Image: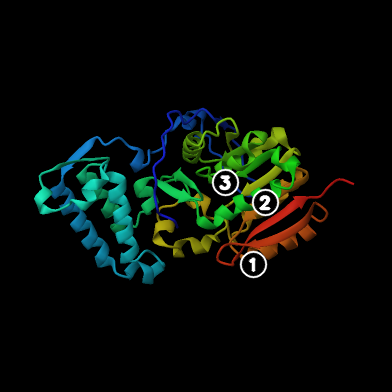
Amino acid sequence: MKLNFTRVCCPSNFSTFIKPSLCTNLHRPLCSSSLSSSHTSLKPQIPLFLRPPMHSATVSDLQKWHDWAKCLASSVGTTFLDSDNGPDSSLLCRELKWLVEDTIEDHSVLSQMSIENGKRSVRLRAGVEDLYNMWKQRIEERKPFQYIVGCEHWRDLVLSVQEGVLIPRPETELIVDLVADVVSENEDLREGLWADLGTGSGALAVGIGRILGSRGMVIATDLNPIALSVAAFNLQRYGLQDIIELRQGSWFEPLKDVEGNIAGIVSNPPYIPSDNISGLQAEVCRHEPKLALDGGLTGMDYLFHLCNGAASMLKPGGLFIFETNGEQQCKCLIKYLESDLRGSFCNVDIVSDFAGIQRFLIGFRQQQT
């Protein structure tokens, strides 16, 4: 994952664009009566680097924390890497550097952290006690660094993320590239209505919205009110509130009013087999939302549901792109389309990710004859 951070500006209103539409999923009940419209007013955690520098500490105290944090990171060695492919000391020390950069208002202090400047006061975006707690969470609890600082780099974006919302992965960026390639040669799709199902942080919706510009529209759905509040933050920060609409609900249910009129559907659904969740990296299985990971016994539950829904929701010539767990799931979906949904789609293909893994299934709704 990319963990290199820059600075962007912060929006003020996060709940304007969320339209609740509570429902159930085809394969399992996902709706809850507790998900009322009041949940859509949730405000997301503000990323660390966007917080005002309301705290202060001496350079000496900051140096003392930094030395302790570096020692803790160095003590990890390759323990996490060997146990579950987690971060080693080298990566943790880089994360520590980024944490310091996000915390300190005046970066010139970084080169002056010494005994001679020990009594100098430094303005911080988090108190020293908070920094101790943050780093303990990172090392002792294996809390993802993105949750610690509240953001993640994705494509050319800096997206707000927090616990309860899946951290967007680099491989998912390719979905936006694929959409860009298609709409560059198809004005009908560029000017159409798109849907991002299970939007999470809103990464795909924001990426695609920036490509479509004012000529297209995106509806992004998610069952999770925390995800929708984070997505609202991200789309407003990039000025896309007139292009992207958020709707609360499970998969296609919030889209009943546009059935058969959608130009494109994208989704990075839960696709990890249930029994494999516990074996994932601790940062993932302990902290990221299981709802966004668990794809059922074989990992295919929601992928089948997406294919079924795409057959009725896409307009003729409409595009779908779904992320999968790899080659086996892609080939299984192709067989499903050829048997259970024969004649519904054309030009179906498998696209590999940056690592050469057959990751994405792409295809078009069959044109009417």
Q: Nearer the viewer, mark 2 or mark 1?
A: 2
User: Marks 1 and 3: CB-CB under 8 Å?
Assistant: no
Which amino acid type is shown beneath numbered disc 3?
Answer: Leu
User: Marks 2 and 1: CB-CB under 8 Å?
Assistant: no
Q: How far apart are marks 2 and 1 (CA)?
A: 26 Å
Q: Is residue 261 visible?
A: yes
Which amino acid type is shown beneath numbered disc 1?
Answer: Gln
User: What crowding class fits label 2: few (fewer than 14 Cα within 10 Å), some (14-19), or many (20 or more)?
Assistant: few
Q: Distance between the residues labelled 1 and 3?
A: 24 Å
Q: Earlier in the sequence, mark 2 or mark 3?
A: 2
* Identity of the residue drawn at 70% across and 32% down: 257
Q: Can residue 250 be seen in this view?
A: no
Which secondary structure lies at badge 3? Answer: helix
Percent coordinates x, y for residue 250 in the rendering:
60, 41
Determine whether 270 is above or below 279 in the image.
Answer: above
User: What crowding class fits label 3: few (fewer than 14 Cα within 10 Å), some (14-19), or many (20 or more)?
Assistant: many
Q: Splitting the image into 4 quarters, where does residue 1 fall? A: bottom left
Percent coordinates x, y for residue 351 in the rendering:
65, 61
Relative placement, left or right, of 360 versus 142 is right
Relative placement, left or right, of 254 versus 340 is left
Which amino acid type is shown beneath numbered disc 2?
Answer: Asp
Q: Distance between the residues labelled 2 and 3?
A: 15 Å
Q: Which of marks 1 and 3 is in front?
A: 3
Percent coordinates x, y for residue 228 in the rendering:
51, 38
User: Marks 2 and 3: CB-CB under 8 Å?
Assistant: no
Q: Which of 75 and 236 is in front in this view?
A: 236
What residue does disc 3 label?
204
What residue does disc 2 label?
181
Q: Which of 305 and 44 is in front in this view?
A: 44
What residue does disc 1 label?
328
Q: Nearer the viewer, mark 2 or mark 3?
A: 2
